[in-house]
Image: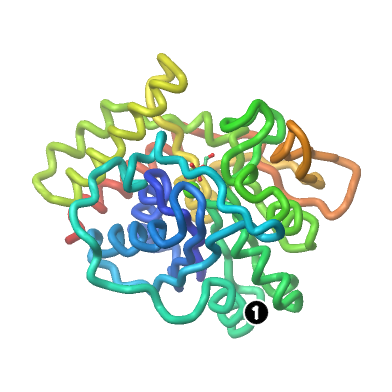
Amino acid sequence: MKPVIFDVDTGIDDALAMAYALSSPELELLGFTTCFGNVPVEEATRNTLAVLEMTGKEIPVYEGADQTFKRGIKPEWARIVHGEDGLGNVLQSTPSNRAASSSAEDFIIEQVKSRPNEITIIAVGPLTNVARAINKAPEIIPLVRDVVIMGGAVNVPGNVTPYGEANIVADPEAADYVFSSGLSVTLVGLDVTMETLLPLSQVDRWRNVDSNIAHFFADMTEHYIGAYESFYPGIGGCALHDPLAVGVVIDPGFVQTEFMKVSVITEGEETGNTVGYKDSEPKIRVCTGVDAPRFLKHFLSRMTEVMSFS
Ligand code: BDR
Ligand code: CA
């Protein structure tokens, strides 16, 4: 089992990624850390606790950044994509559990120090918590096994601007700090995630299962697919951005990668652009190809297991 800290800004695809991770015996989930992003951080924490409660899994949640790393900005939320509650407007009650008392960055530092070279951080929101942790304790940089990041668009256009992907645009300074830090990084960007489309026909199958959790995930994902159809008419599904980052940790063979330095533009109209340089250091692993059908099959088989959780 790979020990994992999972950093989320829980909107819809984060929730799907959580479900995928929670149903995967290859992963030992040490804790979830939350960040602003799709929604403000308090709502990301609430949504993370709600998904955990829905699945019946008891894993600690640590609240993290409520604003960007350097400039202290609270960016635009993504309610237009993820719904007013961040979960496709399906959240019916407030979770009864609370976040743990330590902060996301302190949890990351403490865990990495206690298990040197073992822990993979999966980060599927803005990179603020990771940046804060390595800024506070740079000695952990060589002790992290890998940081697998959903973010960026190296060889393809962005999704919130012509250049930028949402998680990087939300905190470009944090992303640049992480990419240039010397951390081992695997970047799972739009280059590959936009090829992993979940069609409505598959989601409709979840409705055949007579359980609250099945209907929760079906309704939530149907909202996400609706948002995708409105932004990309005729696309035929929603992109499994955050679940693919989990998939890459479970089975790195789902993707092809290339090593390159990635810089983030932090000023001007190209803010958030992730630019790859093949001949410069430090190099990170950038996903450039994906076996989307094999990944989708694996994701769906694990989601079938989730439907029986209670
Ligand atoms: C990323 O942005 C967020 O809206 C999603 O949760 C995902 O992490 C995709 O660009
Ligand atoms: Ca996310």
List the residue tagged with mark 1: 116
Q: Quadrant of residue 129?
A: bottom right
Where in the figure is residue 308, as x and y percent of width and height? 18, 54
Q: What amino acid is labelled 1 in the image? A: Pro
How many discs appear?
Answer: 1
* Colouring: rainbow
Q: Nearer the viewer, residue 278 or 173?
A: 173
Where in the figure is residue 147, as x and y percent of width and height? 63, 60
- Inspect this view and state whether residue 28 appears: no
- Write the residue at 65% across / 47% down: 187
Asked which secondary structure carries label 1, the reply is loop
Q: Quadrant of residue 144?
A: bottom right
- Inspect this view and state whether residue 238 appears: yes
- Write the residue at 9% across / 45% down: 210
The answer to whether 276 is drawn above or below residue 29 in the figure is: above
- Write the residue at 51% across / 59% down: 35
Q: Is residue 169 left or right of residue 176?
A: left
Where in the figure is residue 49, as x and y percent of width and height? 32, 64
* Label 1 crowd bin: few (<14), some (14–19), many (20+), radius 10 Å: few
Q: Is residue 101 left or right of residue 245?
A: left
Q: Is residue 225 left or right of residue 266?
A: left
The answer to whether 25 is drawn above or below residue 87 in the figure is: below
Q: Residue reaching furthest left?
A: 210
